[in-house]
Amino acid sequence: MAHYPVRFALAGAATLALLLSGCAGLPGYPAATGTPVAQLVTDVDCQAPNLNFNWMVFPEGTSTQTDLTATHPDAPEPGRVPADFEPVSAYLCTFYGSVDDDQGRWAAVTVETRNGDFGPLLSALAEPSDQAGLNQACTADMELVPELWLENATGDAMRAAWPRTACGKTKRATSTALDQLELTDTVKLPLVLEVTRPALDAGCVMSTGTPEQSLLFGVTGLQTYTTGEVGENPQPIPVPPAEVPSYDGVDGASVCFYTVDPVTESEPRELRDIEGTEFSDEALDSMLTLRSGTFESATTLEADAAALLPAAASAPQAPACTADLTRFAVLWPGRAGTRLASPIQVELDGCQRLFVPASEARVPAPALLAALIG
C-alpha cells in the first residue's frame, strides 16, 4: 500500500485560551464515552473529505467534492483498537502547508509515518474517555488534533479515537506514546486547489472585493475600537486617511481579470447601535451585501497602455452611477521590475470607473479601458 504519511501538531498545537466555559460542543471533538470498536478498511486515507480538520479546508455549506476528493470515500468513524489488531505503522494526518503542481497550489494535509514499539500507544488508546462532571468548568482552548490511523502487517487500517478528558481534550498519554515512536516518513498530500496555475504564475489572488467595495472601505473612514476598562463603552479611534499613491516612473503592469460573483447576503450586524459610528444607510447596505470577484485570467499591459497609469490618480472624478458590474480588472503597476503595493482597479463594464487607493472613483483614459477590454 502507498504510505500516507505533517508536521506533528499534537494536542494543543494551537490554543486560543480565552475564557472558562462548558466542555460540550468543541468543534469536531466532543467528550466521548463508550467509544465503539473501530471499523477496519483496506487503506489509510488522510484525504477523506469527512476528516475533522476539513472544517478548516472546506467552508460550511460548500461541497467538498472537488476533482480530488470525489475519488476519496468518507473515512469510517474513529474507534477503539480491536483486541486482535497488531499495528506496525501509525499515521498522523494534520492540515498543514500547501503543495504546488501543474494545476496550481493546493491546501495540503501533512502525513507522518511512525514505527516502533506500539505497546505504550495501545495502552494509552485503551484508556476510557472521562465523563464531564456537573457544571464542569473548562478552558475554551481549541486543540488541533491530528487524525490517527493505524495499520497492521496485512494492510488493514483503522482510524483510532483519541481518549478524552472530562473537558473533551486529548489525554496526554496518547501524545507521549506517539512521541516515543520513530518518525520514518513525512509527505504532504493535496486536498483542495486554492490557486490555479494561471493565477499563481501571474501573482493574482483567486477572489477579491469589487472596486466599489474597495472604495467603500477605503474612503468612508472606518474606525477601530478600544474597550478601555472593563464595562466601559467602546471608544472610536479614527483611522488616519491613506495617502493617494504616486505612479510616477511606472513602466509596466500585470493585470488580473475577475468575474463578479452572485450577490450573497452577509450576517446582520448591529452597526447602528455602536456608539460613535456615523455610517450612512448606503454604507450599511453595502456592508451587508458584499460583492467579490473570482479570478478569470491574467495578462500584462503593453508599454503604451502602462504609460497611461501615472495619470490615473489625477483623472476626472466619475459621475454617480449604479449600472450593474460583471467584470473588472486589478492592475499591479511595476517600476524597474518591482511590483508596487498600490493596485489600480478598473470596471470593465457597468459604470466603467477607475479606482486608486484613498481616492474617489475616477474616469479611466479611453485608451487604457480599450486595452483592458481588448
Image (cartoon, grey):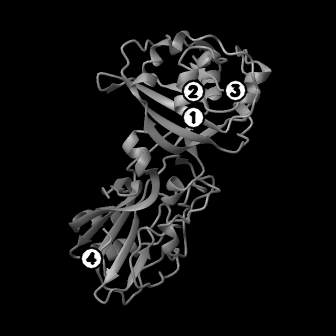
- Left or right: 291, with 36 as reference point: right
Q: Earlier in the sequence, mark 4 or mark 1?
A: 4
Nearer the viewer's eye, disc 3 or disc 2? Answer: 2
The number of callouts visible is: 4
Using the image, tell me which numbered label, if any, was put on residue 118. 4
Please say whether residue 166 is visible from this viewpoint: no
Name the one closer to the observer, 36 or 98.
98
Q: Quadrant of residue 248?
A: top left
Residue located beneath label 3 in the image: 351
Name the one closer to the observer, 146 or 291.
291
Q: Quadrant of residue 345?
A: top right
Q: Is residue 146 above or below residue 328?
A: below
Q: For numbered disc 3, what is the local secondary structure?
A: loop
Using the image, tell me which numbered label, if any, was put on residue 373. 1
Nearer the viewer's eye, disc 4 or disc 3? Answer: 3
Please say whether residue 200 is visible from this viewpoint: yes
* Residue type pointed to by label 3: Cys
